[in-house]
């Protein structure tokens, strides 16, 4: 059973196996409001679902849902595996939720972290917790949906493309990326920057593009269904994030043969990029100037791009879906069998 727990109803954007039952918690509690009473109703609804369904194990994602799942299942004798999907210090929860996380995570059968640095944080923040590191899998080939324009409708066929993908939010640092590109755009007039995604910072980023005189050189076409087409169209992938968990888009781009340039934020990029082999890690303290230098070096050196691109595709094996899911199967199987 798959149970989205957010207050709204929403719709599932992914094709699910016929054996998966999709149940929206909002439907079970008959409310989409965000009041304290509605929060209590969702909490009780979650407990009722687990009690009535009688699962062998519960697997929860996202910090506040993890806390709720651990509290809602108390006394039901169901092992609960919780998972953090980013580096927790990068996204503070506030004092109340942070204390609840610290107190409840030791109740989990296992806490799954995406990186070793994340597990180190867990040992310090919630010392009684049982942690394990499981990275995200590299999905290749990618599923295709018809959403968004084709690359041929957006980019001039004579232009080379520096590509970035992600939500247009502050954490992705696309303002820094645009500023970095402004430092190299004049020197490389046959290269454009394309940022795929949507978010609350669109207006600010568009204004920045205009103010820097980059209209027509920095393109923001929105959400795209066929990301593989864009990865195949690009020459370089750039990640300017201020923080990350374990970035899927970075792995996807590298799986398609793109060398990567990325800020070496606290977790994520350095777990994927082999610096100097399949990409370049830029110290965050170097800022947009450092990112610009790394991009310029990659743009100028055709041989370097090709060699790193060929090395980059190894992420398909290093983080293969089969390999990563085997770790999840082993973990959940142990809990189902009562071995931990």
Image (cartoon, helix red, strand yellow):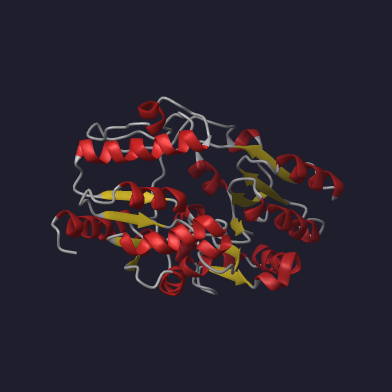
Residue found 77% across the figure and 60% down from its top: 184
**On screen, residue 1 above or below 98:** above
Residue 227 seen by the camera:
yes
Q: Nearer the viewer, residue 51 or 130?
A: 51
Residue found 55% across the figure and 44% down from its top: 230
Q: Nearer the viewer, residue 125 or 230?
A: 125
Q: Image quarter for residue 280?
A: bottom right
Residue ranking furthest to the front: 37
Residue found 46% across the figure and 70% down from its top: 125
Count how many numbered circles sit on residues in the image. 0
**On screen, residue 126 above or below 324:** below
Q: Image quarter for residue 11?
A: top left
Residue 314 seen by the camera:
no
Q: Residue 1: where, in percent of width, then height?
A: 27, 38
**Would residue 269 be found to the left or right of residue 172 on screen?**
left
The quarter of the rendered structure image containing the C terminus is bottom left
Q: Residue 267: where, in percent of width, then height?
A: 52, 67
Q: Nearer the viewer, residue 304 or 208?
A: 208
**Would residue 198 be found to the left or right of residue 311 on screen?**
right
Q: Residue 66: where, in percent of width, then height?
A: 39, 52
Q: Residue 106: where, in percent of width, then height?
A: 34, 64
**On screen, residue 17 above or below 276:** above
């Amino acid at each position: 059973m798959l149970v989205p727990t957010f207050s709204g109803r929403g719709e599932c954007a992914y094709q699910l196996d016929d054996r998966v039952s999709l149940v929206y918690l909002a439907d079970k509690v008959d409310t989409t409001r965000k009041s304290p009473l509605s929060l209590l109703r969702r909490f009780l609804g979650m407990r009722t679902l687990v009690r009535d369904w009688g699962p062998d194990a519960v697997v929860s994602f996202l910090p506040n849902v993890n806390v709720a799942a651990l509290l809602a299942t108390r006394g039901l004798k169901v092992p609960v595996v919780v998972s953090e999907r980013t580096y927790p210090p990068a996204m503070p929860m506030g004092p109340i939720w942070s204390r609840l996380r610290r107190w409840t995570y030791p109740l989990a059968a296992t806490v799954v972290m995406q990186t070793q640095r994340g597990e180190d944080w867990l040992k310090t923040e919630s010392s009684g917790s049982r942690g394990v590191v499981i990275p995200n899998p590299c999905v290749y080939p990618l599923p295709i949906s018809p959403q968004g324009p084709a690359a041929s409708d957006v980019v001039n066929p004579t232009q080379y493309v520096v590509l970035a993908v992600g939500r247009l939010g502050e954490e992705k640092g696309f303002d820094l990326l645009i500023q970095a590109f402004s430092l190299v755009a004049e020197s490389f007039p046959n290269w454009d920057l394309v940022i795929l995604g949507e978010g609350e910072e669109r207006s600010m980023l568009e204004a920045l593009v205009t103010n820097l005189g980059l209209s027509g050189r920095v393109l923001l076409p929105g959400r795209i269904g066929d990301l593989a087409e864009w990865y195949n169209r690009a020459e370089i992938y750039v990640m300017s994030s201020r923080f990350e968990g374990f970035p899927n888009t970075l792995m996807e781009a590298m799986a398609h043969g793109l060398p990567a340039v990325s800020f070496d934020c606290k977790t994520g990029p350095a777990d994927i990029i082999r610096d100097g082999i399949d990409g370049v890690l830029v110290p965050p303290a170097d800022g947009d100037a450092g990112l610009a230098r790394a991009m310029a070096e990659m743009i100028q050196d055709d041989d370097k791009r090709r060699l790193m691109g060929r090395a980059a595709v190894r992420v398909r094996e290093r983080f293969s879906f089969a390999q990563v899911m085997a770790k999840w199967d082993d973990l959940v199987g142990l809990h189902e069998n009562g071995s931990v």
